[in-house]
Image (cartoon, rainbow, N blue to C red):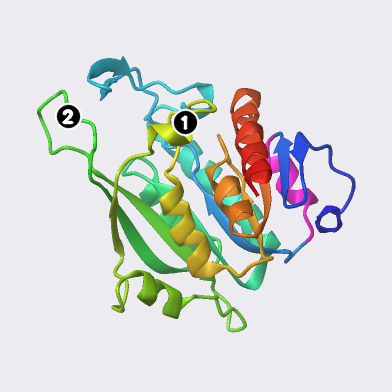
């Protein structure tokens, strides 16, 4: 996959199907060649780290995840958040093929900015997927409804030449012969998927499996600009796709590396 980069890129880890890069996506994405990627899955910062509390495994814990998840909520900082989203989405558009597509996961804290940023940067939203969590943590404040969903936006380039790939028949088959709806229900990430280490916003593998199977073919290139502990890469390589993952946090990439090595050893 080295031919996808405009010049040599220092890798944190690589095998036959996966490249993992320690660094800032704003600096790494421009090094990829234009129009070389089939699918992008992004789980960007939700900017939830506001010194609040939540419930985890029956215990009251801080919602703070790290400096990478902080931005605040003043007017100036809100504008900064939207500028951040427009910038990385614009970089993703450049590397995406005409028939490629992008998936972005978020919550009410960032998804509205992301939806607007997509349209401002020349994307057309295909679907608004609601991921309904069957076992969400309880709401400790008891002053609003329990937060039990996340949104995943699926979009393609707003271009007459853009024709995104969709494996309609497979999705119908996976749904018992009926058209699959845009509400997907399932549990939070299983403990077995966190044996190599934990990430505060780690997505379950079944979620990424549906995303990747629905919009790519074997051998396609999948990029995750905020890859965290590597769920996108684990599922992509297991399904025979090529993967490029980028993250600024070394500790999470160490988890990604271990998970990818396990996939490679299990084959």
Viewer-nearest residue: 137 or 237: 237
| Crowd around label 1: few <14 · some 14–19 · many ≥20 (10 Å) | some
Residue 6 in view (yes/no): yes
Give the image quarter of residue 50.
top left
Residue 157 vs 130, above or below: the answer is: below
Viewer-nearest residue: 239 or 35: 239
Q: CA distance from mark 2 to mark 1?
A: 24 Å
Q: Secondary structure at mark 2?
A: loop
Q: Position of residue 4 (x, y in %)?
A: 81, 57
Q: Which residue is under mark 1?
A: 194
Q: Which residue is under mark 2?
A: 139
Mark carried by residue 246: none
Residue 119 vs 142, above or below: the answer is: below
Give the image quarter of residue 178.
bottom left
**Picture residue at 56% right of the left edge, 80% below the top:** 163
**Left or right relative to 125: residue 134:** left
Query: What stretch of residues is rendered in magenta?
Result: 24-33
């Amino acid at each position: 996959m080295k031919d996808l980069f405009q010049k040599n890129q220092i890798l944190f880890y690589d095998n036959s199907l996966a490249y993992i890069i320690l660094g800032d996506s704003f600096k790494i994405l421009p090094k990829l060649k234009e129009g070389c990627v089939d699918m992008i899955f992004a789980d960007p910062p939700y900017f939830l780290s506001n010194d609040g509390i939540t419930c985890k495994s029956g215990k009251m814990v801080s919602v703070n995840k790290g400096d990478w998840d902080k931005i605040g909520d003043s007017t100036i900082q809100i504008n900064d958040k939207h500028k951040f989203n427009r910038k990385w989405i614009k970089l993703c558009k450049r590397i995406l093929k005409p028939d490629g597509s992008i998936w972005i996961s978020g919550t009410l804290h960032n998804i509205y900015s992301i939806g607007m940023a997509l349209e401002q940067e020349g994307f057309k939203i295909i679907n608004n997927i609601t991921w309904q969590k069957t076992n969400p943590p309880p709401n400790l404040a008891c002053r609003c409804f329990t937060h039990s969903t996340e949104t995943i936006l699926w979009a393609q380039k707003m271009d007459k030449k853009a024709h995104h790939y969709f494996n309609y028949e497979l999705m119908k088959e996976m749904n018992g012969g009926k058209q699959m709806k845009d509400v997907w229900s399932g549990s939070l990430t299983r403990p077995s998927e966190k044996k190599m280490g934990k990430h505060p916003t780690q997505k379950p593998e079944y979620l990424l499996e549906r995303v990747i199977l629905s919009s790519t073919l074997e051998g396609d290139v999948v990029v995750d600009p905020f890859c965290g502990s590597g769920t996108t890469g684990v599922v992509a390589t297991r399904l025979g796709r090529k993967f490029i993952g980028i993250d600024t946090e070394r500790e999470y990439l160490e988890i990604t590396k271990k998970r990818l090595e396990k996939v490679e050893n299990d084959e």
